[in-house]
Image (spheres, rainbow, N blue to C red):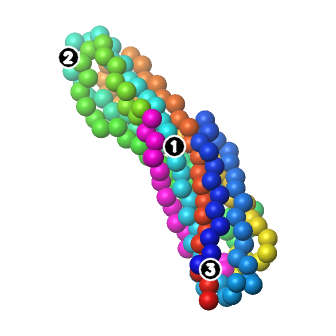
Amino acid sequence: TSTSTFTNANESVEFTQSGVLNQFSPGLGTLVSAVLTITVHAIVDGSVTRDATAGSFTINQTIGIDCNLTSDLSPLDSLINATPVTLTMAGSAFSMAASTTHTFFSSAAGSVADSSTDLSGILSDLTGTGTFTIYGGSATGASTSGTHISSATNSEVAGFDASITYTYT
């Protein structure tokens, strides 16, 4: 096998990133399969503060980061741009007392979503001595559920990485 990879650092969302991967070199042999793996990664901080209403109420917070992908290699673009890779982080629902603050995702490092795509249908397009670029952009959504919430905050940094593994004979 032969593998080409790139890694992007986390950036404040919404991010726009890209990376370059090598085509399969025909000098290595005959390409028999290729798999592209995209990894979306994030670190999220969030908190919720309850108002002074007496009683205990159930609260939850969910963060979703979609990474929409495109490529300058047209046959690859048609395979990856239809469905985003989604990273979802959900806190566990719990009860909060009045006038308290709870931190949900304090530095949730290591939160990742992987997506692998079989590229068997475009092997000839992946063969050559050049490179191709994959572009990714994020769309982030956050939701807080529960009653008597006086404030909810969250901040995210995220990015994506890619690797392509070529199998040849």
| Left or right side of 117 for 135 | right
Q: Residue at x 45, y 46 (%)?
A: 111
User: Who comes first in sequence, dot 2 or dot 3?
Assistant: 2
**Residue 133 in the image: x percent, y percent?**
73, 60
| Left or right side of 83 for 95 | left
The amino acid on which the numbered mark 3 sits, given as a three-letter code, is Gly
Residue that label 2 marks: 55
User: Who comes first in sequence, dot 3 or dot 1?
Assistant: 1
User: Who comes first in sequence, dot 2 or dot 1?
Assistant: 1
* Residue 138 seen by the camera: no
- In 3D space, how far apart are the residues under numbered discs 2 and 1 (Cα atoms)? 34 Å
- In 3D space, how far apart are the residues under numbered discs 2 and 3 (Cα atoms)? 59 Å
Residue that label 1 marks: 42
The amino acid on which the numbered mark 1 sits, given as a three-letter code, is Ala
- In the image, the segment drawn in magenta is 107-123
Residue that label 3 marks: 121
**Residue 144 in the image: x percent, y percent?**
39, 31
Q: Residue at x 26, y 14 (%)?
A: 98
Location of the C terminus by quadrant is bottom right
Q: Secondary structure at mark 2?
A: loop
* Residue 44 seen by the camera: yes
Vertical placement of 39 versus 54: above or below?
below
**Residue 53 in the image: x percent, y percent?**
26, 12
Location of the N terminus by quadrant is bottom right
Q: Residue at x 37, y 27 (%)?
A: 103
